Each structure stands twice: as structure tokens, then as C-alpha cells.
Amino acid sequence: DPVGDVGYSTGSTAAPPYRDIVSAEIRQKDGVFTFSMELAAPVPERPDLPPGVKLLWWDWTWSNDLSFIAAGYPFPPGFFSHGMFYLNVIWDGTSFSGSFIDRRPLLTGGAPLEVAVPFSVERGVPRAFVDASLFDNPSTFRFFIQTWDWPAVAELGSFSYFQVDVAP
């Protein structure tokens, strides 16, 4: 992804380069997928939250089934997305966390499965680790990566997020 194509944060200021996606890598070893994201600059140990923002997300979204489309979480009930799975390294202003969201239950009226996952932000590179069994150990899948801001007034499941950068 080209350096410098990052948008603005919700605070209406230019997003910092650690929100600017350059590339991504996915590896599998011993039944665990490792997702990593190269950015235009390393993620600081304590990133600044832009004014009015409560969460920064470094996100990998993918689907094992190209026909998948479901409405709902982490978006509002009427918003459809082809993403079956969302994997995030999240900064909340105090600490980092890792989250995996399985949206498949939305197709049958169920609630999505959200679980904490191991992650790291070593040398400024966000990485998250997911057991292949959580998403049926696919041999291939389609994915893209994003960085998002979630405003302080918004809850997950709302349409108030702001996409800072997206790639393939």
C-alpha cells in the first residue's frame, strides 16, 4: 500500500504514520496463524488518541467464503459486510488488547463470537495470533487490512467508526 495515502483521524488532524498501512503478512505454523502489519512508522508504546477518539484498531478482515455477507457487529444491524472474521490489535488509551470476531452466527440470527487473542506490538509492529481451528483452518482466504478510529461517543455496533487507512 502506498505510504502517505492515510486519511484523517476523527479529530480532523492528519493521522500519524503509525496508522498508515504499508503491507501485511500472514503466516501459519503449528496450527496458529500470525497476522502482522507493516506501517509507515512504528506504533509507539503509548500512542496518542486523537481528540474525541476512544479506540485505535489495527484490523485484519477476511472471509473463507466469497459469498458470505452479513449485517451487524461490529457495525450497526443494517450494515452489511463480506468480512466473516475481524482480528484486531486495539489501543484504548491505557493498554493494548487483541480481539477476534467470528461473524458467522449473524447469518442465523445469533450473536457474533468475540474472544480475546494473544497479540504483540514488538518494535512497533502490531501482530495477532489466532488458532486455525477458530476459523476452520482454511487453505486460502481473501483478506484486507485497515486502521480505524472509534470515537469516544460511539459504541461498537454503531456506524460511528472512521476508517483511517485500508489496503490491499
Image (tube, helix red, strand yellow):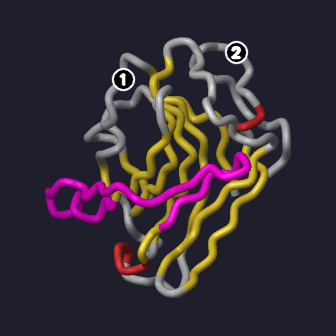
Of residues 113 and 123, the one nearer the viewer is 123
Residue range in magenta is: 102-129
**Residue at the spot of label 1:** 154
Q: Is residue 135 left or right of residue 32?
A: left
Front in this rendered view, residue 78 or 21: 21
Question: Horizontal and vertical percent for residue 144?
Answer: 60, 58
Image x and y of residue 69, in percent:
37, 60
Residue 25 placement (x, y as % from top left)? 69, 67
Q: Residue furthest left?
A: 109
Q: Nearer the viewer, residue 143 or 55?
A: 55
Q: Amino acid at mark 1?
A: Ala
Amino acid type indicated by mark 2:
Thr
SS of the residue at dot 2?
loop
For disc 1, the neighbor class at 10 Å (few under 14, some 14 to 19, many from 20) is some
Which residue is under mark 2?
13
Observer-nearest of 78 and 96: 96
The correct choice, above or below, for 93 with respect to 108 in the image is above
Q: Give the SS element for disc 1.
A: loop
**Measuring 75% from the left and 47% from the top, which residue is drawn there?**
39
User: Residue most toward the right?
Assistant: 3
Q: Is residue 128 magenta?
A: yes
Q: What residue is shown at x 50% (from left), y 26% (from top)?
A: 93
Question: Residue 138, image x and y in percent?
Answer: 47, 83
Q: Residue at x 57, y 45 (%)?
A: 58
**Relative to 38, is 10 on the left or the right?**
left
